[in-house]
Image: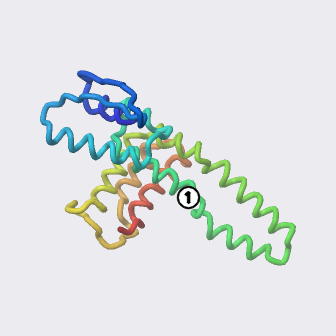
Amino acid sequence: SAASDVYKRQYQRRVRELDDDFQEALSKGSVHTGNIDDDCLKICEDCSLLYVIPRTSLNHLLISKKLSVAQITYAYICWKFAYHFVGQVYAEEYSQLSEAFYNEPELLLQLNKFKDDLLGETFSEARIHAAIVEHPEIVQELYFDFKQRHFFGAPNFLKAFDKSHGQELIAKIKKTVNNEIDAQILCSFLTFNRHLLK
């Protein structure tokens, strides 16, 4: 289960797990930890996030300890954000071309088909997923940036919108990520961080 994945990530070995099925199809287990208060709080936080997004194709990054539960949840949300909004990068160019072809419906139809095909193939969900899996260390840094801006008590908590925010992270993405499409996808995560309102 996803909860046992959390425990496996947090601790190298489990002492005991019982998989007895009850009438309500529940399972029980026993967990032995060191500092019971901190460990239980962390496990509860992680399990509550897994309740929101129980199983995704990113869960293997949890088991391999490349991303935490919070980072996987963040990556999943950014994945969906990027899929729906990353194509907006070309909105200005598209609107200029569509205005130029306004009186030529055949060309406008071809332009619309070309735009849909280009965005569908370039920024597909599978492509965004691959960028996340390929660059978990960048996702960690993007999550840290998100946490610094949106977690209560963080140093940059809810600073005013700043278009120049994250320039050093953008430079690192462009330097580290060799594929331009992956770089655009990961930069869209930073756009998510910048524009999200609490």
Viewer-side residue, 77 vs 35:
35
Colour scheme in use:
rainbow
In the rendered image, the vertical position of residue 193 relative to residue 62, given as above or below: below
In the rendered image, the vertical position of residue 33 relative to residue 51, given as above or below: above
Extreme-front residue of the structure = 23
Is residue 13 something that shows in the picture?
Answer: no
Return the x and y of residue 21 as percentages of the image width and height. Answer: 39, 28
In the rendered image, the vertical position of residue 101 relative to residue 1, given as above or below: below
Is residue 64 something that shows in the picture?
Answer: yes
In the rendered image, the vertical position of residue 103 relative to residue 172, given as above or below: below
Figure disc tally? 1
Q: Residues within 10 Å of mark 1 (few under 14, many from 20)?
A: many
Query: Element at badge 1?
Result: helix
Examine the image and state in which quarter residue 4 appears: top left
**Screen quadrant of the C terminus:** bottom left
Residue, x 62% and y 67% (percent of image)?
91
Residue, x 41% and y 49% (percent of image)?
52
Identified by mark 1, the residue type is Val
Viewer-side residue, 190 vs 64:
64
Residue, x 20% and y 62% (percent of image)?
153
Return the x and y of residue 131 as percentages of the image width and height. Answer: 50, 42
Viewer-side residue, 59 vs 18:
18
**Screen quadrant of the N terminus:** top left
Residue, x 87% and y 67% (percent of image)?
106
- Per the image, the residue denoted by label 1 is 86
Examine the image and state in which quarter residue 33 appears: top left
